[in-house]
Image (spheres, rainbow, N blue to C red):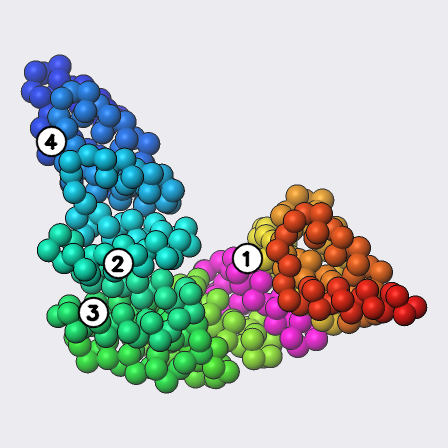
Amino acid sequence: MLTISAVCDTEIFLQIPPSRSTYNNLINACGSSGNWKEALNVCKKMTENGVGPDLVTHNIILSAFKSGAQYSKALSYFELMKGTHIRPGTTTLNIVIHCLVKLRQYDKAIDIFNSMREKKSECTPDVVTFTSIIHLYSVCGQVENCEAAFNMMIAEGLKPNIVSYNALIGAYAARGMDNEAHLFFNEIKQNGFRPDIVSYTSLLNAYGRSQKPHKARQIFDRMKRNQLKPNLVSYNALIDAYGSNGLLADAIKILREMEQERIQPNVVSICTLLAACGRCSRKVKIDTVLTAAEMRGIKLNTVAYNAAIGSCMNVGEYDKAIGLYKSMRKKKIKTDSVTYTVLISGCCKMSKYGEALSFMEEIMHLKLPLSKEVYSSAICAYSKQVST
């Protein structure tokens, strides 16, 4: 099989110097598949052969880093790019904003966005820019700013696309604002677009978060009637809609339904069911869900263990919760502040104050961030220990 580097070598051997366009196409072929290392190799060969990179080259390299989830490397490359005579364009800055959001460097992303708006003659914000900013505010839970960015985009003469609408609906869904989510879902159709799987799943999620699981099911069924096949995310959202509202039996039925459709549940499905067990105070079901995960070869991660430990604590199964914690440590699965929060608060609820303080010492030793709940539980445990 002929490699990309071999293509370059063949052209040189035939004394046909590859053009910048040829190199850019080769780099793009690597980058589009997330093979950022090979993209860099071709770029290096390009420079060695006396063909300097242009803005298109830099954008392709940045896009390769983005596709390969190498966000920090993309930002480092961008800093090097700024030292050249080539000025970044809108596409360049869109990629940089995306990477900053992924790295949770929100203030820097907003600074670039504001700079783009102030210097429109250089890099005019486009629909992609505004959509990234809507997503940023959504992640930060600032739904009012999501609306402001969406309206600003329209005011500047840009027409939202399906991704823009989905970002806004997703922001409403995360806050359980089902009326607003439904309004913009309908606007998608009014503006000539067809709602996609993301649109339906976000609306479904909005109804689940607003404690309307049966409405969520209606959206799920409508999605199927409109010839859209629900994916894993859709099924997990429906499981959560039922589970978060205490309808554990219905949530488990969805798990079976997705398997009948040959969609295998993942660790998110299991986490959602475990959390539902805790809400419903169902001791037996916790074991059933854990067994189901084991039978399907689903390896529990930190979030799953936290959900299981929390559920056991909620139903008074202290020994089982501690057993899960020990299993977690034995398997070298990372414990985090959530792990210790559920352990400490759970111990205090069951009047096991000495054990709570032991976990408090452990979290202090690990230098993990302490939540208000941990502080409150620790104060309670200390006071109870002193009084006894």
Please identify the quadrant where the C terminus is shown. bottom right
Select label 1 or label 3 by which is in front. Answer: 3
Residue placed under numbered mark 1 in the picture: 267
Query: For mark 1, does the 10 Å Cα neighbourhood hold few (<14), some (14 to 19), or many (20 or more) residues?
Result: some
Alpha-carbon distance for marks 2 and 4? 30 Å
Q: Residues within 10 Å of mark 3 (few under 14, many from 20)?
A: many
Residue located beneath label 2 in the image: 113
Q: Is residue 381 left or right of residue 98?
A: right
Judging from the image, what secondary structure is the residue with disc 4 in? helix
Residue kind at label 4, given as amino acid type: Arg
For disc 4, the marked residue is 20
Q: Give the residue at x 26% y 81%.
A: 186
Nearest to viewer (mark 3 / mark 4) = 3
Q: Is residue 270 magenta?
A: yes
Q: Is residue 347 above or below residue 243?
A: above
Tag on residue 153? 3
Name the outermost residue toward the left. Answer: 16
SS for tag 1? Answer: helix
